[in-house]
Amino acid sequence: MRPTWRVAGAAALWLVLEWYGATSEISWLFLLGVWIAAVVLIAAMYASWNRGLVLHLELESSGPGAQSPVHELPEHVLRTGPFPAPIFEGDSFQVSVGLDTRGGDRGPAWVAGDVSGLQIRFGTGIVPRTGWRRSRTIDALRRAPISASEWTIHTSDPLGFFHGVRRCDDAELGIVLPKFCSLAGRRQARELEAAASAPRAGVGVELFGVREYRAGDALRRIHWRSSARLGELVVREYEPPGVQSLAILVDPSPRSQAVADQVARIAASEAWDCIREGGRVSIWGPGLQATEPRQARDLWALLDWLARYPGPAGDDPAPVTSDVVMVTGSPDASLVEEAESSRRRGARARAWLIGDAELDVDLPVERAGVEWPL
Protein backbone atom coordinates (compact mmCIF):
# COMPACT_ATOMS: atom_id res chain seq x y z
CA MET A 1 0.00 0.00 0.00
CA ARG A 2 1.37 3.38 -0.98
CA PRO A 3 -0.02 6.92 -0.71
CA THR A 4 -1.28 8.77 -3.77
CA TRP A 5 -0.86 12.43 -4.65
CA ARG A 6 -4.02 13.18 -2.69
CA VAL A 7 -2.19 12.53 0.58
CA ALA A 8 0.31 15.24 -0.36
CA GLY A 9 -2.58 17.56 -1.16
CA ALA A 10 -4.24 16.82 2.20
CA ALA A 11 -0.94 17.41 4.01
CA ALA A 12 -0.49 20.73 2.21
CA LEU A 13 -4.04 21.78 3.09
CA TRP A 14 -3.44 20.82 6.74
CA LEU A 15 -0.28 22.96 6.85
CA VAL A 16 -2.11 25.91 5.31
CA LEU A 17 -4.92 25.62 7.85
CA GLU A 18 -2.46 25.40 10.74
CA TRP A 19 -0.53 28.41 9.50
CA TYR A 20 -3.62 30.48 8.79
CA GLY A 21 -5.20 29.51 12.12
CA ALA A 22 -2.04 30.52 13.99
CA THR A 23 -1.78 33.92 12.23
CA SER A 24 -5.50 34.76 12.23
CA GLU A 25 -6.28 33.30 15.67
CA ILE A 26 -9.36 31.49 14.31
CA SER A 27 -9.54 28.45 16.52
CA TRP A 28 -11.94 26.34 14.43
CA LEU A 29 -9.30 26.16 11.64
CA PHE A 30 -7.20 23.98 13.97
CA LEU A 31 -10.18 21.65 14.42
CA LEU A 32 -10.65 21.46 10.64
CA GLY A 33 -6.97 20.55 10.25
CA VAL A 34 -7.36 17.74 12.82
CA TRP A 35 -10.37 16.44 10.90
CA ILE A 36 -8.37 16.31 7.67
CA ALA A 37 -5.56 14.39 9.39
CA ALA A 38 -8.12 12.00 10.90
CA VAL A 39 -9.72 11.37 7.48
CA VAL A 40 -6.31 10.47 6.00
CA LEU A 41 -5.56 8.12 8.92
CA ILE A 42 -8.95 6.39 8.63
CA ALA A 43 -8.44 6.07 4.86
CA ALA A 44 -5.07 4.39 5.49
CA MET A 45 -6.64 1.92 7.92
CA TYR A 46 -9.47 1.13 5.50
CA ALA A 47 -7.10 0.69 2.54
CA SER A 48 -5.03 -1.76 4.56
CA TRP A 49 -8.16 -3.76 5.47
CA ASN A 50 -9.45 -3.59 1.89
CA ARG A 51 -6.52 -5.71 0.64
CA GLY A 52 -8.19 -8.96 1.79
CA LEU A 53 -9.40 -9.90 -1.71
CA VAL A 54 -8.74 -13.05 -3.75
CA LEU A 55 -8.61 -13.21 -7.56
CA HIS A 56 -11.08 -15.50 -9.34
CA LEU A 57 -10.27 -16.75 -12.87
CA GLU A 58 -12.22 -19.56 -14.51
CA LEU A 59 -13.33 -20.81 -17.92
CA GLU A 60 -17.12 -20.55 -17.99
CA SER A 61 -18.14 -21.95 -21.36
CA SER A 62 -17.01 -22.38 -24.94
CA GLY A 63 -18.55 -22.05 -28.36
CA PRO A 64 -17.40 -24.33 -31.21
CA GLY A 65 -16.23 -22.79 -34.48
CA ALA A 66 -17.24 -23.88 -37.97
CA GLN A 67 -14.39 -26.41 -38.26
CA SER A 68 -14.45 -27.62 -34.67
CA PRO A 69 -14.22 -31.42 -34.21
CA VAL A 70 -16.87 -31.10 -31.49
CA HIS A 71 -19.51 -31.38 -34.23
CA GLU A 72 -18.28 -34.85 -35.22
CA LEU A 73 -17.19 -36.43 -31.93
CA PRO A 74 -19.49 -39.02 -30.34
CA GLU A 75 -21.21 -38.10 -27.11
CA HIS A 76 -19.39 -40.75 -25.08
CA VAL A 77 -16.04 -39.27 -26.18
CA LEU A 78 -17.07 -35.71 -25.31
CA ARG A 79 -18.17 -36.81 -21.83
CA THR A 80 -14.58 -37.79 -21.00
CA GLY A 81 -13.12 -34.53 -22.30
CA PRO A 82 -12.03 -31.37 -20.47
CA PHE A 83 -14.57 -29.49 -18.34
CA PRO A 84 -16.72 -27.56 -19.13
CA ALA A 85 -16.05 -28.47 -22.79
CA PRO A 86 -13.01 -29.05 -25.00
CA ILE A 87 -11.73 -25.96 -26.81
CA PHE A 88 -10.26 -26.35 -30.28
CA GLU A 89 -8.51 -23.95 -32.65
CA GLY A 90 -10.96 -21.35 -33.92
CA ASP A 91 -13.43 -21.87 -31.05
CA SER A 92 -14.43 -19.11 -28.65
CA PHE A 93 -14.63 -19.29 -24.90
CA GLN A 94 -15.83 -17.15 -22.03
CA VAL A 95 -13.56 -16.43 -19.09
CA SER A 96 -14.97 -15.39 -15.74
CA VAL A 97 -12.92 -12.73 -13.92
CA GLY A 98 -13.76 -11.60 -10.43
CA LEU A 99 -12.87 -11.13 -6.79
CA ASP A 100 -13.79 -12.99 -3.64
CA THR A 101 -13.72 -11.39 -0.20
CA ARG A 102 -12.78 -12.75 3.17
CA GLY A 103 -15.28 -11.36 5.65
CA GLY A 104 -17.55 -8.42 4.89
CA ASP A 105 -18.10 -6.31 1.80
CA ARG A 106 -15.03 -4.53 0.47
CA GLY A 107 -14.12 -2.09 -2.28
CA PRO A 108 -13.26 -0.26 -4.37
CA ALA A 109 -11.05 -2.66 -6.32
CA TRP A 110 -10.06 -3.53 -9.85
CA VAL A 111 -8.14 -6.31 -11.57
CA ALA A 112 -5.92 -6.34 -14.64
CA GLY A 113 -4.01 -9.02 -16.48
CA ASP A 114 -3.45 -11.05 -19.60
CA VAL A 115 -5.29 -14.14 -20.91
CA SER A 116 -3.54 -15.70 -23.91
CA GLY A 117 -2.24 -12.34 -25.09
CA LEU A 118 -5.48 -10.37 -24.53
CA GLN A 119 -5.34 -7.60 -21.93
CA ILE A 120 -8.34 -7.59 -19.58
CA ARG A 121 -9.23 -4.94 -16.99
CA PHE A 122 -12.35 -4.74 -14.81
CA GLY A 123 -13.22 -2.62 -11.77
CA THR A 124 -15.96 -2.34 -9.16
CA GLY A 125 -16.94 -0.02 -6.35
CA ILE A 126 -17.87 -2.85 -4.00
CA VAL A 127 -17.12 -6.55 -3.68
CA PRO A 128 -20.05 -8.20 -1.84
CA ARG A 129 -19.69 -11.23 0.39
CA THR A 130 -21.00 -13.43 -2.40
CA GLY A 131 -18.16 -12.31 -4.68
CA TRP A 132 -18.00 -10.15 -7.76
CA ARG A 133 -17.82 -11.46 -11.35
CA ARG A 134 -17.41 -10.17 -14.89
CA SER A 135 -17.16 -12.19 -18.12
CA ARG A 136 -15.13 -11.71 -21.27
CA THR A 137 -15.45 -13.64 -24.54
CA ILE A 138 -12.25 -14.52 -26.39
CA ASP A 139 -12.46 -15.67 -30.01
CA ALA A 140 -10.42 -17.74 -32.46
CA LEU A 141 -7.46 -18.73 -30.36
CA ARG A 142 -4.49 -20.68 -31.69
CA ARG A 143 -3.32 -24.05 -30.44
CA ALA A 144 -1.62 -23.49 -27.07
CA PRO A 145 -2.28 -23.54 -23.33
CA ILE A 146 -4.65 -20.78 -22.17
CA SER A 147 -2.35 -18.87 -19.85
CA ALA A 148 -3.30 -16.22 -17.31
CA SER A 149 -0.26 -14.07 -16.61
CA GLU A 150 0.72 -10.77 -15.00
CA TRP A 151 -2.55 -10.49 -13.07
CA THR A 152 -2.74 -7.86 -10.34
CA ILE A 153 -5.36 -6.87 -7.78
CA HIS A 154 -5.61 -3.11 -7.16
CA THR A 155 -7.33 -1.78 -4.05
CA SER A 156 -7.91 1.66 -2.59
CA ASP A 157 -10.00 3.60 -0.11
CA PRO A 158 -13.19 5.42 -1.20
CA LEU A 159 -11.38 8.79 -1.31
CA GLY A 160 -8.36 7.52 -3.24
CA PHE A 161 -5.71 8.48 -0.66
CA PHE A 162 -3.94 5.11 -0.83
CA HIS A 163 -3.37 2.51 -3.53
CA GLY A 164 -2.48 -1.16 -2.98
CA VAL A 165 -1.23 -3.58 -5.65
CA ARG A 166 -0.86 -7.32 -5.19
CA ARG A 167 0.55 -9.59 -7.89
CA CYS A 168 -1.01 -13.01 -8.49
CA ASP A 169 0.69 -16.19 -9.59
CA ASP A 170 0.51 -17.12 -13.26
CA ALA A 171 -1.91 -19.94 -14.01
CA GLU A 172 -3.10 -22.19 -16.82
CA LEU A 173 -6.87 -21.94 -17.26
CA GLY A 174 -7.20 -24.56 -19.97
CA ILE A 175 -5.79 -25.54 -23.32
CA VAL A 176 -6.67 -24.94 -26.97
CA LEU A 177 -6.46 -28.30 -28.74
CA PRO A 178 -5.51 -28.82 -32.39
CA LYS A 179 -8.30 -29.30 -34.92
CA PHE A 180 -8.54 -32.72 -36.50
CA CYS A 181 -10.74 -34.88 -38.69
CA SER A 182 -10.77 -38.42 -40.01
CA LEU A 183 -8.16 -39.02 -42.74
CA ALA A 184 -9.17 -42.63 -43.34
CA GLY A 185 -10.75 -41.75 -46.68
CA ARG A 186 -7.48 -40.27 -47.96
CA ARG A 187 -5.38 -43.33 -47.25
CA GLN A 188 -5.15 -46.57 -49.09
CA ALA A 189 -7.29 -49.17 -47.33
CA ARG A 190 -5.29 -51.61 -45.27
CA GLU A 191 -5.36 -55.29 -46.14
CA LEU A 192 -7.53 -57.30 -43.79
CA GLU A 193 -6.55 -60.77 -42.70
CA ALA A 194 -9.42 -63.02 -43.75
CA ALA A 195 -8.56 -65.60 -41.16
CA ALA A 196 -8.57 -63.12 -38.30
CA SER A 197 -11.32 -63.72 -35.79
CA ALA A 198 -12.56 -61.39 -33.08
CA PRO A 199 -10.25 -62.11 -30.10
CA ARG A 200 -11.21 -62.07 -26.48
CA ALA A 201 -9.98 -58.85 -24.83
CA GLY A 202 -6.90 -59.28 -22.70
CA VAL A 203 -5.48 -62.35 -24.42
CA GLY A 204 -2.73 -61.87 -26.96
CA VAL A 205 1.01 -61.73 -27.22
CA GLU A 206 1.93 -58.10 -26.52
CA LEU A 207 2.11 -57.10 -22.84
CA PHE A 208 0.79 -53.58 -22.22
CA GLY A 209 -0.02 -53.46 -18.51
CA VAL A 210 -1.47 -55.14 -15.43
CA ARG A 211 -4.89 -55.19 -13.83
CA GLU A 212 -6.52 -56.59 -10.68
CA TYR A 213 -6.99 -60.36 -10.45
CA ARG A 214 -10.47 -61.63 -11.31
CA ALA A 215 -12.00 -65.03 -10.67
CA GLY A 216 -11.14 -67.33 -13.56
CA ASP A 217 -7.82 -65.70 -14.49
CA ALA A 218 -5.03 -68.21 -15.09
CA LEU A 219 -2.50 -68.37 -12.25
CA ARG A 220 0.40 -68.20 -14.71
CA ARG A 221 -0.68 -64.66 -15.63
CA ILE A 222 -0.23 -63.34 -12.07
CA HIS A 223 2.51 -60.71 -11.89
CA TRP A 224 4.02 -61.61 -8.52
CA ARG A 225 6.38 -58.64 -8.21
CA SER A 226 3.61 -56.08 -8.77
CA SER A 227 1.27 -58.07 -6.52
CA ALA A 228 3.80 -57.91 -3.68
CA ARG A 229 4.30 -54.17 -4.15
CA LEU A 230 0.57 -53.36 -4.32
CA GLY A 231 -0.55 -55.79 -1.64
CA GLU A 232 -3.14 -57.43 -3.91
CA LEU A 233 -3.09 -59.90 -6.77
CA VAL A 234 -2.66 -58.38 -10.23
CA VAL A 235 -2.35 -60.15 -13.56
CA ARG A 236 -0.60 -59.35 -16.82
CA GLU A 237 -2.84 -57.76 -19.46
CA TYR A 238 -2.03 -58.54 -23.08
CA GLU A 239 -2.95 -56.71 -26.24
CA PRO A 240 -5.40 -58.72 -28.36
CA PRO A 241 -3.81 -59.96 -31.59
CA GLY A 242 -4.56 -57.85 -34.64
CA VAL A 243 -5.08 -54.58 -32.69
CA GLN A 244 -3.22 -51.71 -34.34
CA SER A 245 -0.43 -50.00 -32.44
CA LEU A 246 0.59 -46.75 -34.09
CA ALA A 247 3.66 -44.58 -33.50
CA ILE A 248 3.37 -41.00 -34.77
CA LEU A 249 6.82 -39.51 -35.32
CA VAL A 250 6.68 -35.70 -35.40
CA ASP A 251 9.12 -33.04 -36.57
CA PRO A 252 11.16 -31.97 -33.50
CA SER A 253 11.92 -28.48 -34.88
CA PRO A 254 9.18 -27.16 -37.18
CA ARG A 255 10.40 -24.20 -39.21
CA SER A 256 7.34 -22.02 -38.49
CA GLN A 257 4.28 -21.82 -36.29
CA ALA A 258 2.04 -22.62 -39.27
CA VAL A 259 3.97 -25.83 -39.95
CA ALA A 260 3.87 -26.80 -36.26
CA ASP A 261 0.09 -26.28 -36.20
CA GLN A 262 -0.36 -28.46 -39.27
CA VAL A 263 1.88 -31.20 -37.85
CA ALA A 264 -0.30 -31.22 -34.72
CA ARG A 265 -3.54 -31.37 -36.76
CA ILE A 266 -2.42 -34.25 -38.96
CA ALA A 267 -0.99 -36.15 -35.98
CA ALA A 268 -4.26 -35.64 -34.07
CA SER A 269 -6.24 -36.91 -37.06
CA GLU A 270 -4.07 -40.02 -37.37
CA ALA A 271 -4.43 -40.66 -33.63
CA TRP A 272 -8.22 -40.28 -33.79
CA ASP A 273 -8.53 -42.74 -36.70
CA CYS A 274 -6.45 -45.30 -34.82
CA ILE A 275 -8.17 -44.93 -31.44
CA ARG A 276 -11.71 -45.11 -32.78
CA GLU A 277 -10.78 -48.43 -34.43
CA GLY A 278 -9.62 -49.76 -31.05
CA GLY A 279 -5.90 -49.16 -31.56
CA ARG A 280 -3.20 -47.69 -29.37
CA VAL A 281 -1.15 -44.57 -30.17
CA SER A 282 2.26 -43.23 -29.13
CA ILE A 283 3.63 -39.84 -30.17
CA TRP A 284 7.36 -39.26 -30.28
CA GLY A 285 9.94 -36.88 -31.72
CA PRO A 286 13.74 -36.76 -31.45
CA GLY A 287 14.62 -34.75 -28.34
CA LEU A 288 10.99 -34.54 -27.23
CA GLN A 289 9.30 -36.18 -24.28
CA ALA A 290 7.11 -38.97 -25.66
CA THR A 291 3.57 -39.75 -24.59
CA GLU A 292 3.22 -42.30 -21.80
CA PRO A 293 2.04 -45.89 -22.41
CA ARG A 294 -1.01 -45.35 -20.17
CA GLN A 295 -2.13 -42.56 -22.55
CA ALA A 296 -2.16 -44.82 -25.60
CA ARG A 297 -5.97 -44.99 -25.75
CA ASP A 298 -6.70 -41.59 -24.20
CA LEU A 299 -7.58 -39.23 -27.04
CA TRP A 300 -7.64 -36.17 -24.76
CA ALA A 301 -4.18 -36.88 -23.32
CA LEU A 302 -2.77 -37.19 -26.84
CA LEU A 303 -4.46 -33.95 -27.92
CA ASP A 304 -3.07 -32.22 -24.83
CA TRP A 305 0.44 -33.36 -25.83
CA LEU A 306 -0.08 -32.06 -29.37
CA ALA A 307 -1.47 -28.74 -28.06
CA ARG A 308 1.88 -28.19 -26.30
CA TYR A 309 3.97 -29.44 -29.24
CA PRO A 310 6.94 -29.03 -29.83
CA GLY A 311 7.67 -29.29 -26.10
CA PRO A 312 8.63 -30.33 -23.53
CA ALA A 313 12.11 -31.69 -24.16
CA GLY A 314 13.08 -35.26 -23.30
CA ASP A 315 15.24 -38.19 -24.29
CA ASP A 316 12.68 -41.00 -24.47
CA PRO A 317 13.38 -43.81 -26.95
CA ALA A 318 11.13 -44.24 -29.96
CA PRO A 319 8.22 -46.67 -29.37
CA VAL A 320 8.16 -50.02 -31.14
CA THR A 321 4.81 -50.52 -32.89
CA SER A 322 3.24 -52.29 -35.84
CA ASP A 323 2.50 -49.06 -37.73
CA VAL A 324 4.50 -45.84 -38.04
CA VAL A 325 3.47 -42.46 -39.45
CA MET A 326 6.03 -39.69 -39.83
CA VAL A 327 4.64 -36.13 -39.89
CA THR A 328 7.24 -33.50 -40.71
CA GLY A 329 7.92 -30.26 -42.53
CA SER A 330 11.66 -30.83 -42.96
CA PRO A 331 14.03 -33.75 -43.66
CA ASP A 332 15.22 -34.17 -40.07
CA ALA A 333 17.91 -36.86 -40.21
CA SER A 334 17.12 -38.52 -36.87
CA LEU A 335 13.39 -38.58 -37.63
CA VAL A 336 13.94 -40.13 -41.08
CA GLU A 337 16.36 -42.71 -39.66
CA GLU A 338 13.85 -43.79 -37.01
CA ALA A 339 11.05 -44.14 -39.58
CA GLU A 340 13.24 -46.23 -41.89
CA SER A 341 14.49 -48.34 -38.96
CA SER A 342 10.87 -49.09 -38.04
CA ARG A 343 10.17 -50.16 -41.62
CA ARG A 344 13.20 -52.46 -41.61
CA ARG A 345 11.92 -54.03 -38.37
CA GLY A 346 8.70 -54.94 -40.18
CA ALA A 347 6.42 -52.01 -39.28
CA ARG A 348 4.11 -50.53 -41.90
CA ALA A 349 5.54 -47.04 -42.35
CA ARG A 350 4.45 -43.97 -44.29
CA ALA A 351 4.98 -40.21 -44.11
CA TRP A 352 3.26 -36.83 -44.33
CA LEU A 353 5.37 -33.96 -45.71
CA ILE A 354 4.17 -30.41 -45.05
CA GLY A 355 5.29 -27.67 -47.41
CA ASP A 356 7.68 -27.81 -50.32
CA ALA A 357 10.70 -29.45 -48.66
CA GLU A 358 12.27 -32.54 -50.25
CA LEU A 359 12.28 -35.80 -48.36
CA ASP A 360 14.65 -38.57 -49.44
CA VAL A 361 13.03 -41.55 -47.78
CA ASP A 362 11.97 -45.01 -48.94
CA LEU A 363 8.39 -44.60 -47.67
CA PRO A 364 5.02 -43.69 -49.18
CA VAL A 365 4.81 -39.90 -48.80
CA GLU A 366 1.74 -37.68 -48.96
CA ARG A 367 2.19 -33.91 -49.25
CA ALA A 368 0.10 -31.26 -47.54
CA GLY A 369 0.11 -27.50 -47.19
CA VAL A 370 -0.60 -25.49 -44.06
CA GLU A 371 -4.30 -24.89 -44.84
CA TRP A 372 -7.02 -26.78 -43.04
CA PRO A 373 -8.97 -28.85 -43.92
CA LEU A 374 -6.64 -30.70 -46.25
Image (spheres, rainbow, N blue to C red):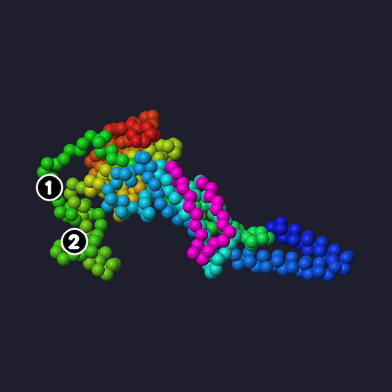
> Foreground residue, 91 or 197?
91
The reply, left or right, for residue 10 in relation to residue 203 is right
Quarter occupied by residue 274: top left
Q: Left or right: 153 with respect to 321?
A: right
Q: Is residue 216 left or right of residue 370?
A: left
Residue 237, position as x, y percentages in the image: 21, 57
Q: Residue at x 21, y 62 (%)?
A: 235
What crowding class fits label 2: few (fewer than 14 Cα within 10 Å), some (14-19), or many (20 or more)? some
- Which residue does the image show at 34% across and 36% down from the upper left? 373
Badge 1 marks a residue whose secondary structure is loop
- The disc labelled 1 sits on which kind of residue? Ser
| Foreground pick, 26 / 152 | 26
Q: Is residue 299 visible?
A: yes
Q: Position of residue 325 (x, y in %)?
A: 30, 40
Magenta stretch: residue 128 in it? yes
Looking at this view, is 341 or 273 the one in front? 273
Q: Quadrant of the N terminus?
A: bottom right
Residue carrying label 2: 221
107 versus 239 height, above or below: below
Q: Name which residue lies at 54% across and 58% down.
A: 168
Which residue, given by chain and number where applicable, does mark 1 sit on? 197
Query: Mark 2 or mark 1, which has the lower sequence index?
Result: 1
Quarter containing the C terminus:
top left
Q: What is the number of the mark on residue 152?
A: none
Segment tinted magenta in the rendering: 118-144
Place of residue 280 in the rendered image (x, y in percent of width and height, measured from the top left): 26, 49
